[in-house]
Amino acid sequence: MSTVDTPGGDAGRAGGAGARAVDAARAAAGANKITWLTLALMTTSSVASLRAAPTMAVYGLACVFLYLLPAVVFLLPTALVSAELASGWTGGVYNWVAQGLSKPLGFLAVWCQFAMTIFYYPSLLAFVASTISYVINPALASNGVYTAIVIVVLYWTGVWVSSRGTNAVAGLASWGLIIGTLIPGTLLVLLGFVFLGQGNPSAAPMDASHIFPQWTGIASLVLIVNNFLSYSGMEMNAVHVNKLRDPAKEFPKAMFLAMGMVLLIFILPALAISWVIPADQLSLTAGVMQAFDAFFQYFHIGWLVPIVAIALCSASLGGMLTWLAGPSKGLLLISRQEGYLPPFLQKLNPHGIQQNILVTQGLLTTVIALLYALIPDVSSVYWIFSVITTQVYLIMYLLMFLAAIQLRRKQPDHPRGYRAPLLTTICVVGFVASALAMVIGFVPSSQFGGGSAWAYIGIVGGGLLLLGVVIPFSFLKARKPSWRQPDADTTEEAVA
């Protein structure tokens, strides 16, 4: 058959097919669009959680200030800056930093995004352990050996589930927001208002003199550091900015709405906890269940305790499975393209899952979990892990803010779906706030108990140095051309 037969007819048919293809593409593009309200809800679901509420509840009314300040100087800059980067450059934080600064620093950024989960999982699962204890025996919430066992069992179960490549992970994570965050959070706040409305006094002062935390030196600012981690994750949803119909107008609306909802989810439950549990009796891991237990006993509905505990666990476990599948996958893909990790860590199991990375991470998580068994005060261990997690993650944000400034300077005409207003100013505010948060994180807070300040600094500094500097730069120094995988997947979907 001749390929040039009746060229006019072929051209006409080709033109018609081309027009239909264009129409189909436009229809598909329109179908893939999302509303700014949808993006706001997606962002809220990825950031908001009840897990951090007890940490702030110890400050009573001052928790409002402790949440608002980092929201203004960190949450908002992160959202606006990551939106511009995501709308102009695919590939996530690695590509942003690699193009703005350098490829090694891009690896450091994506490494920190992954490495922070090494301490994140123990602290998250410690919350799950304390919550489960209210189904079994509430006294176990402060038992380090019990906490360590639960962490190890649940983490390795999560690794097994993730290694099977099951689709149930996505469903569990989605329902976790509704079942384990929105419903329990709303119930907690309603019970708190009814409790106060019946004339019961608040366990924490609620007068104007307690709007700001009591100043006891620089240690008074330490609790703000933990809230930086609470607000982390905004950069992940920025990749959807191009799906908005009018990003320049709709994205800021989505972010301001999301920020308002996140603040409500964080602040109101923290206040409700402070109304019923005195600060000196509050556990950082079991505080949410302490409050539910107190309210349920007061209203004579104690049978709801195990139901709420299971709901809270579903949210946390869904979040853990999501994090297991996410950052480690991104690290794997970048490493296969550029050869950053040795071949052993790049191997996939028959289900296409980065099992060796998950197992190696699991061994470290197991060692860290043992600290819960060795250190008597579970709350102290939980606090230390939260701080180390924040410190490591902040390295990524520091690099992201610097990269954004450089990209605006070096590639001003690069097409962007969204341009953040006053980008340099926003980046400077975010960078300075992140840097100060790292410095303040080395100051022991009251949550560390009566331990040695130098021991605290040594643990936090050692964790930051090891995870954020020594290990990633060791990989870079040992890097070999043979570590690069020529068949690595480099599609946008793979690394976005």
Image (cartoon, rainbow, N blue to C red):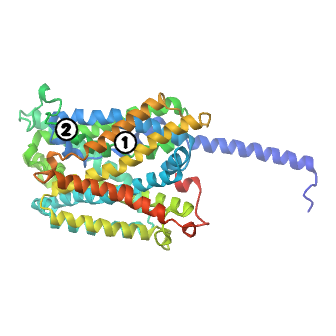
Splitting the image into 4 quarters, where does residue 467 fall? bottom left
The percent position of residue 198, horizontal first and vertical second, equals 8, 34
Asked which secondary structure carries label 1, the reply is helix
Q: Amino acid at mark 2?
A: Ile
Q: Residue 148 at what x, y percent from top left? A: 21, 66
Q: Is residue 417 visible?
A: no
Q: Residue at x 31, y 43 (%)?
A: 228
Circle 2 residue: 218
Residue in the foreground of this view, choosing between 215 and 475: 475
Please rate how many residues cluster around mark 2, counting C-alpha atoms within 10 Å: few if below 14, some from 14 to 19, many from 20: few
Q: Earlier in the sequence, mark 2 or mark 1?
A: 1
Question: Image check: 299 left or right of 335?
Answer: left
Q: What residue is at 39 percent from the left and 61 percent from the top?
A: 471
Q: Position of residue 290 (x, y in %)?
A: 13, 50
Q: Secondary structure at mark 2?
A: helix
User: Mark 1 = which residue?
Assistant: 44
Q: Which quadrant of the figure has residue 337?
A: bottom right
Q: Nearer the viewer, residue 237 or 226?
A: 226
